[in-house]
Amino acid sequence: MSAIQSLFNVKFPLIQAPMAGVQGWELAAAVSGAGALGSIPCAMLTPDAVRDAVTQFRAQCDRPVNLNFFCHTPVKVDTDLQLKWLEQFRPWYAELGLPAPSLPAGPGRRPFNQDMADLIAELVPEVVSFHFGLPNDELLQQVRSSGAKIISSATTVDEARWLEQKGVDAIIAQGLEAGGHRGMFLSEALSTQVGTFALVPQIKAAVRVPVIAAGGIADAPGVQAALALGADGVQVGTSYLLCPEAHTSTVHRRALTSEAACHTVLTNLFSGRPARGIVNRMIRELGAINMLAPRFPHATAASAPLRAAAEERGKSDFSPLWAGQNVTGCQAIPAAELTQSLVSRISLSGNKN
């Protein structure tokens, strides 16, 4: 039995990556029911919505669950910058026949706070994971006191050492190939980011806690290879995006099965933080990294009405099409079946119960 199987009380050392905006409790329940660790993304949910999601999960599945939260430091809205940012989008508003907002509305992503910490004590999830570092020591201790295992993402060795010093139970080594937001928090320099199979052995050598490989792992051979490299567990996200339990939009599903899915980039256009997604019109015309983009999460609102209008017309021109560099594992099959497929070779490396 691997350290991750023992730590999380799961049959397989596999975690379904939490993917805010494209999944809820349904995917998590299907994955946990199949013997891995399902995750519910909570960064875009209210406390009541988190409570409802966990209640639904518990009604469907009696296995462990991971609740995931963001830990970004809120920044004040810079009105002048917001207006400059909005100017980049006005031609598209005119093209779609939409009135451009005078000033974008507020963001929908909240950092972990006292209300959520109180909710953790109430709901008692088996695992709580964080992105962009960790909450302050008081909130972290409250989560720890609930009995939940605590994990967080590291994109560099320095971040992994920092997380270990803070007392996490395991570290997710998020390689450059991973879809969605980079979990980087000690540096904003993209030059510090490396691939999964370069990052995992370096982090393994630097810390004593279990290490979970994430990024570009899409199928059973990839899972097997990550474990053979020394990872104690594996996190997979992109491969689940076509499962019926996911909430992935129609245009996003179409993009994942198109030739466009072969070309992903890190972009700050959709949120203000680097995140990996499939190249679309907005990225091509504004550039993947745009220095005018407001800081996370204030960049989001300028393109939100455009996204909604374009998606109604069946287009993904302004949609964040989050995906990792390897979409070959995406299959439109039940999540439990995909989970079984992902772990089908683990026995070859001695990690299966």
Image (cartoon, rainbow, N blue to C red):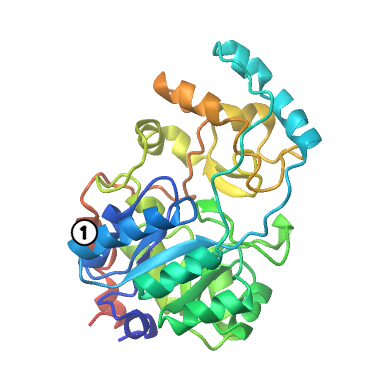
The location of residue 130, given as percent across then percent down, is: 52, 67
Q: Secondary structure at mark 1?
A: helix
* Residue 182, quarter of the rendered image: bottom right
Residue located at (64% from left, 49% from top): 273
Visible in this render: residue 77?
yes
The location of residue 64, given as percent across then percent down, is: 29, 73
Apparent side of residue 282 relative to residue 348 in the rendered image (left or right): right
Q: Is residue 115 above or below residue 126?
A: above
User: Which amino acid, mark 1?
Assistant: Ala
Visible in this render: residue 314?
no
* Residue 290, quarter of the rendered image: top right
Seen from this angle, which residue lies furthest right?
80
Towards the viewer: 46 or 186? 46
The location of residue 348, given as percent across then percent down, is: 27, 77
Q: Which residue is mark 1?
A: 336
Other-residue count near label 1 (Cα within 10 Å), few / some / many at <14 / 14–19 / ≥20: many
